[in-house]
Amino acid sequence: MDQTGKPQRQSVAKRAANLFKSAVGLTTEEKPAVQKEEKPVSEALVVEKLSPVASANKLAERCRLYLSTADVNKIREAFRYADEAHLGQFRNSGAPYITHPIAVAEILASWHLDAQAIEAGLMHDVLEDTGITKIEMSEKFGVKVADLVDGVSKLDKLKFSSNEEAQAESFHKMLLAMSRDVRVILIKLADRLHNMRTLGAVKPHKKFRIAKETMDIYAPIASRLGLYSVYRELTDMSFSYMYPIRYKVLEKKVEDARARKKNQLDQIFHETSDKLAERKISGEVQGKSKALWRIYTKMKERHIHFSEVLDVHSFRVLVSTRDDCYRALGVIHELFKPVPGRVKDFIAIPKANGYQSLHTTVIGPGGLMVEFQIRTEEMHHICEDGITAHWLYRDRSQAEALQRSTTNWLNSLLEIQKQSGTSLEFMENIKVDIFPDRVYVFSPQGKIIQLPKGATAVDFAYQIHSDLGNCCVGCEINGERAPLTQQLKNGEMINIIKGDKPTPNPSWLSSVRTGRARAEIRQYMRSLSAEGKIELGRELIARLSKTHHLPISKVTDEDWERVCKANGFADKNAVLEAIGSGQKDSLLLVHQLTARHSLRSKGESPEQRELDPVLNLRGRTCKLSPCCTPARDDAIVGHNIKATNTVHIHRKDCSHVQRGLRSDPETWSDFQWNPQYHEGFHIKLDIDITDIHSTLEQITGTIAKQGSSVTGFSMSTPCPDSAKVEITVLVKDTNHLSKIINAIRAIETVRVVSRHLEADINTKPVDVEADE
């Protein structure tokens, strides 16, 4: 479906006026050594400026370059069919609606897709927006074309809403459609690409939603299919519409940096070119601009300034052979000093989507850091064109290998889908397969296994075979015994020790990273009887308590009742069954069970446990406010509620205090902490993380090591590859809290951790579609 709005009818005069307004001119200029990426918006508008017939003729001429006359005639027939079906419909820009399907077909033709895909691209909105049926289309164009159009039409109806379950169901359907015929998603990507190029015609309040959906859903799929040129364009356009001010500021910074460093960049360009020629290495040095979205995400994830991004400036070196790639790397390292740890070889070990290249960051003239990417022409085509290289370069073995790799990946999604209980579970299982950051390890036979970053030996075992994963009881890493949950590093050799019978451990769910491992473990747990799940839950609690030094022996029936009530369970057995079946995070529940006992000293008397946290209450009851969660050593004030004879204790920096002192200062007074109070303080922390599964276990484990417990937990996932966590911890005082925060901050996958402080309820809410 055309994301720029519902097709609408306009008068010929209004259409002509709108076409005139949308007309733009193109200028050319001399290209410097480092080229600025051209924006595709103008090209998209120029396509719309052409008459539909002229655009169709242009499409036919492009297709004639690689398709037979019979195929071109079928494409012309599909154009006439779509043109008649969309007669009288217009886009928001004022252009005839048929210009959009033609533009989609143009993109497909630029990828050299077959005639069936281009016919489907021309007619991709016909079934949805007209009265034509799939049967009628099948009779005229064949079943395969009609199936493609129907597949794209079903994707068009998917609504990627903010509701997590609804989005999971839609994403589920999309990936299943991909697995049946990858051309469906290629047509959809071409459709989305043209819609983004013409998003300027959409109403402002819709731009953010469409851009975010593109960033969250379609750009990652383009990346996984190896379509880097599409990925770069989608992410940068989405960035410009989601955060226009940030985009413009960063764009200006990049332009200014390029202008300031022009002499050094030109020197690097010429020295590299001359040295390659001197060594008789046939190659071309190209200046390239790093995608603004990649620069922005790197700054955000690493909490660094623009000046600290090492590879803003980069060059691409295209050579003839694989051997020349390594020779060129030697030449570059001879000319410029390489930055330690910044050399990566994706030629020997390609990425999962077929990407191959040598990467190195070097220190050039004046201390300027520059990245070089070195690859052959063929590798470059695969890098830019991804899965479409199967059609673009039919005689290339690497393109065929990429096609097989993609097919295997799509089939693996089907296997994960079969093992997943719900669409939400399926979505969770495949996230890491859509958003990969890979490590490469070896089997004892020397086979290279690609896994997501943070994967464990359990992931490795399931990647080899599901039976090996179910029966694994131990592992050797580089010949030495190691825990099954230890994260793997590049180049390690893994040997799995197999047991006699399947005994997957539900606790693995908190550490495994692959969707296949997660799905298989959950499937095993679902197969257990209720008694088996309860017994397994009991074993896990005992094991985790021992590992994290949590006082499970002190837990009383009262503690079990409290945890059951807080989590909505009927009784203790229901909690154990939920742990044994993997429905609940066992470590979090153990934290909740032991929270009341973790801070108490051995000699503490019952009288001390009944003390109030603050002094001089004078017969009033005391409540620590949940909006700012104060703790000992915080500067505090109390709000006296006469109706209930209760004092609400706040931190002095709480926004509610500032507002309250202005409106009713008589009811506020200073208070002091009671030094004899040892029950602990429940403090909320806000944490942004990038790796949900492994990070949560690290956070809860870290909190336990600091002598604290988790007493509350909630999480939201605004993006598929990140999460916002609100976690409540039990602390002795602010010094204890600082140690916990610093320990959490040291976890690599934690972006931000801060003490929670609610905004004033009278504060105007921020518009989520605004830039800031």
Image (cartoon, rainbow, N blue to C red):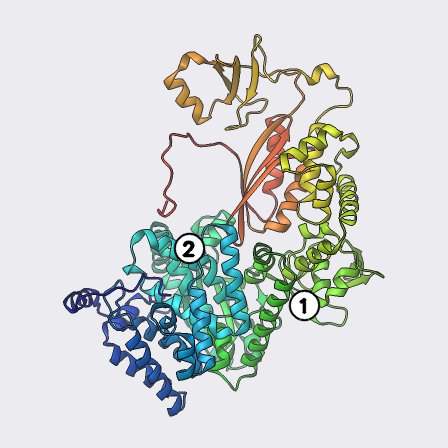
Task: Between label 1 and label 2, give the one nearer the viewer.
Answer: 2
In this rendering, would 375 be left or right of 608?
A: left
Q: Is residue 217 visible?
A: yes
Tell me residue 368's x, y (percent): 45, 58
Please, what secondary structure does the residue beneath circle 1 have? strand
Q: How crowded is mark 1: few (under 14 residues within 10 Å), some or many (20 or more)?
A: some
Quarter where residue 125 is shown: bottom left
- Against 21, is 77 above or below? below
Which residue is most to the top?
A: 618
Residue 625 image position (x, y, % from top left): 53, 24
User: Which image quarter: residue 539?
Assistant: top right
Q: Residue at x 32, y 80 (%)?
A: 81
Q: Which residue appears farthest toward the right when viewing the image?
A: 500
Mark seen at residue 312: none
Instruction: Please tell me which residue is depicted at 52% across the width and 12% down the height of the picture.
Output: 645
Q: Which amino acid does label 1 sit on?
A: Ile
Judged from the image, the secondary structure of the residue bearing numbered disc 2 is: helix
Residue at image location 41% in from the left, 63% down from the top: 234
| Quarter of the figure with the C terminus | top left
Residue tagged 1: 449
- Please state which amino acid type lies under the numbered disc 2: Lys
